[in-house]
Image: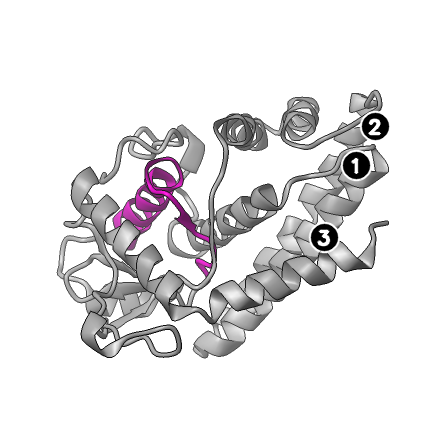
Amino acid sequence: RTSLAPIVSDIRNSMLEEVDFTKEAQHLAEFSSFLDRSGLRAVATCPSVYKQFSGKKVLVMERLNGVPLSDLDAIRAQVPRGIEPELVLINALNTWLASVVGCPTFHADVHAGNLLVLSDGRVGFIDFGIVGSISPPTWAGVEALLRSTTTGDYNTMARALATIGATEESVDYDAFAGDLKKLFDSLQAIDADLVIAAGTGAVSAEVAVDDAAVNRFLLELVRVGEEHGIKFPREFALLLKQLLYFDRYNRLLAPQLKVFEDNRIDLGGKQGAA
């Protein structure tokens, strides 16, 4: 449905950004400053960079020793007594949400291999090769989308997605809502695949399954949007993908936690630590 040239150009630019380690070092520095400025260093961290040994082609960082955020048993064995996996998850989510609105860029690759739970209970964010930024209007639409997901209000969800995307024609919101319901019902299959992968104990297998499933869902969402005349900005896809990862962690670590109803979680990104 789209010209191939812009897609190839976008892939090229993304790859060049990802292999320029001076930019990744800058992203790390920005996130580190954000943690200190927001008072979140007590619950989250990122590697410090050894600038004297780093450049465009080499990045030398502090090593963070931890376990993947998706590994419930390992987290329980790793963190001090009294720190529940649910609290670790809430702190990770609040930190990331706060960074979306409080940091020049947000981490746009928060799969299980890039979020480590350290021995003191903090969450270590690593690998800042892929980052994103988002405009206030898009974030407002995302907030409306998240709240409608909680209530199962697909008509409101359809209107929120239309606000986020660009459309040159009138939208049949009832039809769009019906297609969205079918699509979000498919998330159950993603959960099942992830639980099976997590049970293998292999982080690489889990990351591969989760990444493939999330990408399939995003492609389907883009397709459904286009069928109703809506085209989403790239920043929205990056943001939504990270939220889907956190949804996976929610179901694995704290399935009873109702993220959008818990007052310890700040969708506005201002609350910080629980």
The location of residue 5, given as percent across then percent down, is: 78, 59
User: For numbered disc 1, what is the local secondary structure?
Assistant: helix
The location of residue 225, given as percent across then percent down, is: 76, 38
User: For numbered disc 3, what is the local secondary structure?
Assistant: helix
> What separation in Å lies between label 3 and label 2 (alpha carbons)?
19 Å
Mark 2 vs 1: CB contact within 8 A: yes
Q: What residue type is labelled 2?
A: Ala
Q: Which of 254 and 7 is in front in this view?
A: 7
Taking 221 as reference, is 108 left or right? left
Q: Which of 54 and 230 is in front in this view?
A: 54
Q: Which residue is drawn at 68% across and 60% down?
A: 9
Q: Which amino acid does label 3 sit on?
A: Leu
Residues in magenta, as a range: 84-111
In which quarter of the view is residue 122 placed?
bottom left
Vertical order, 19 against 227 (above or below): below
User: For numbered disc 2, what is the local secondary structure?
Assistant: helix
The location of residue 32, given as percent across then percent down, is: 23, 53
Local crowd size for mark 2, using a 10 Å CA cut-off: few (<14), some (14–19), many (≥20): few
Q: Residue under circle 1?
A: 179
Q: Residue under circle 2?
A: 175
Which is the main secondary structure of the residues drawn in magenta?
Answer: helix
Q: Earlier in the sequence, mark 3 or mark 2?
A: 2
Local crowd size for mark 3, using a 10 Å CA cut-off: few (<14), some (14–19), many (≥20): few
Q: Residue under circle 3?
A: 219
Taking 85 as reference, is 127 left or right? right
